[in-house]
Amino acid sequence: MRPGLAYLALVVLLASAGWFSLPAARAAEPQLVLRGLDPIELIAGREVPGRPAISSVRGAYRYQFASEENKRRFEAGGERYAVQIGGACAKMGPLSGKGSPDRFLVFDGRIFLFASDSCRNAFTTEPEKYVDRADPAPTGTPEQAQRAAVLLEKAIAAVGGPERLRDLAEVQERRRISGESGGTPYSYTETIQLGFPESIRVIDDFGGSTYGWALEPAGAVLLEKGEATPTEPSVTEFVRREYYRQPLALLEAWQRRAATAFARGPARANETALERVTMHAGGATTTLGIDPATGRVVEASYRGRITRGISEAVLRYSDFRDVDGILVPFRIDRWADGAPLTQPGLAIESVEVRFRTRAKPPVPQAP
């Protein structure tokens, strides 16, 4: 079994330079869900069988209804009455494999699916730990907004400067993920490809067995057996929030005026004094820790999925290196709810960048 977060399988099309592209999206064949029970009645607390003659397809599933009126309510209600997060296991999260169509639970007026009874039991114990929602937008004073602008401009200068960042098209990072599952060691390659604006592709490669997901202009897709399956809007929103957890994505968004930001005052990361800036873009709120002396983003923190379940996540960046005029970290240390994450291990192996033009980075001038 695949260790860590469970993503759907993908056969990636590899370009000669090592950058990957996506196959065309294809909708899955609809599957009967909820044992044929009427979802409108189920949400109301009643298990009422639906009729095969009164059915509707949404996403990957076919729903049955006890009446035409319930079918009309379902079709007018958007995602509200359908299984949530595209049918992914609610405990494992929106990017996990599908839950069983017959293993479900109603929480807060919504229907969730689960991959196993243990997943459903864990969700029942702490549902708020597993329900992904958009982050509230931060507020602040004009003075906090002004200080945030000063710090972010310094961060943009440190990463390569406004012109270099504006010309940046893609950043691809290859990671080695390693650890132990059930006493068995494992190791695989993870590739994260950021495109600007609002594109992210993540591929986990187990030496021929690959898993992935992506955010493209048309929405988010999960990838399996060489095919891209489009997701429900709620999953697209989740993936967009994952994109805006990335410091480079936030700096690029700030530069094109697609983010808000407020300074939150001084703090420390290990031995480094920093100033915090809370940013909001794409439904995600992330706080960056910026070294005011160098402008480097040395920390990012947010509430989200860094392990199995939602926690207070902290990522600290170090070992900064210049890659074709863009300064990127080659080390990331992670914490969840104040505890360091050592499993799985993460080591950055390489970083590549692409630009919209082929202009070379400026040559530093002698003082």
Image: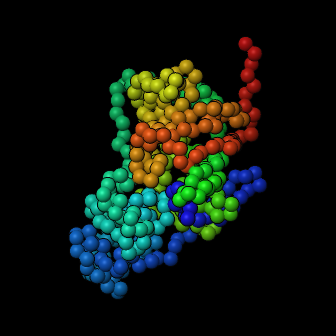
Residue 74 percent location from the top left of the image: 31, 71
Is 271 drawn above or below residue 89 in the view shown? above
Q: State the scheme by which the image is colored.
A: rainbow
- The structure residue drawn at horizontal position 68% and vertical position 63%, both measured from the top left corner, is 208
Which residue is the extreme one toward the top?
Answer: 367
Residue 166 image-quadrant placement:
top right
Residues 337 and 94: in front is 337
Q: Is residue 342 above or below residue 5?
A: above
Describe residue 344's horizontal placement relative to residue 113 as left or right: right
Compared with residue 34, is residue 203 higher up or lower down, i.e. above or below?
above
Examine the image and state in which quarter residue 104 appears.
bottom left
> Does residue 217 appear in this view?
no
| Left or right of 309 on screen, residue 163 | right
- Residue occupying the far bottom of the picture: 53
Q: Position of residue 140 (x, y in %)?
A: 35, 29
Question: Would residue 136 be found to the left or right of residue 167 on screen?
Answer: left
Residue sitting at x 34%, y 63%? 121
Residue 28 seen anywhere in this rendered image of the structure: yes
